[in-house]
Amino acid sequence: MRLLLFGAPGVGKGTQAKLLSVKFNIPHISTGDILRQAVKDQTDLGRKAQEIMSRGDLVPDNIMIGIIKYRFSKSDCKNGFILDGFPRTTNQAVELDMLLNEMNINDIKLINITADEDAIVKRLNNRRACKVCGHIFTLSEIEKSDKCPNCKASNSFYLRDDDKEEVIRKRLEIFRKTTEPVLEYYAKQGNVISINGLGSVEEVNSELLKFLGN
């Protein structure tokens, strides 16, 4: 099973990707993670990406495609993968299609997790991170204690900049302008599965598995 995970910031892509990864025993591939790993490993593409990022520029699509190709070629992707965070533009979608054709991969499904924007803002604004261990919790999870459930640090919770309303709405605006056209691109191919992401984690996962035939 090969899946592209799609959706606005805060819809729960990462959580569902981890669950699906365990369910189908396929890797969850975050493009941010594999980019950082390529830089850490100092691969040819990783060194090029590092040089570009050190100038404050965005990593070009051709380099990202090369890093994704390298990751897809690893043995743990033989039976499938979940790609999260790419493509973000229509041009990237076209480049990815070319790569998939080259690798004879033709069974990709796009999972589109949706949610009302105000609900996304409320959900993310309702989170707090521990400044000691970095774990993120909802307010309901920590309302009865000032100690982090993970590392036991006291009075360590804070609202991350990424979870502030003005930042969230800016990210959502960017998503609408640059990334939503990717959904239209794949919808024309008839392989999009849309799921409402506002239910509980279990409810959303159950709907996903139902659409995937499991």
Image: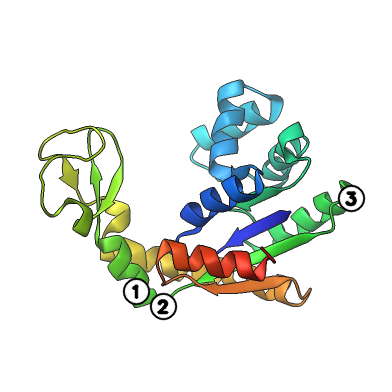
| Residue 119's disc number | 1
With 163 as the anchor, is 55 left or right in this view? Answer: right
Amino acid type at image mark 2: Asp
The outermost residue toward the top is 42
Residue 48 or residue 97, whichever sits in front: 97
Tell me residue 35's x, y (percent): 59, 37
User: Which image quadrant: the N terminus?
Assistant: bottom right
With 142 as the anchor, is 98 left or right in this view? Answer: right
Q: Quote the CA–CA distance across marks 1 and 3.
A: 39 Å
| Residue 104's disc number | 3
The residue at 54%/38% (across/down) is 33
Residue labelled with disc 2 = 116
Q: Quadrant of residue 69?
A: top right
Q: Are marks 2 and 1 in contact (CB under 8 Å)?
A: yes
Disc 1: CA contacts within 10 A as few (<14), some (14-19) or many (>=20): few
Amino acid type at image mark 3: Asn
Residue 53 position (above or below residue 106)? above
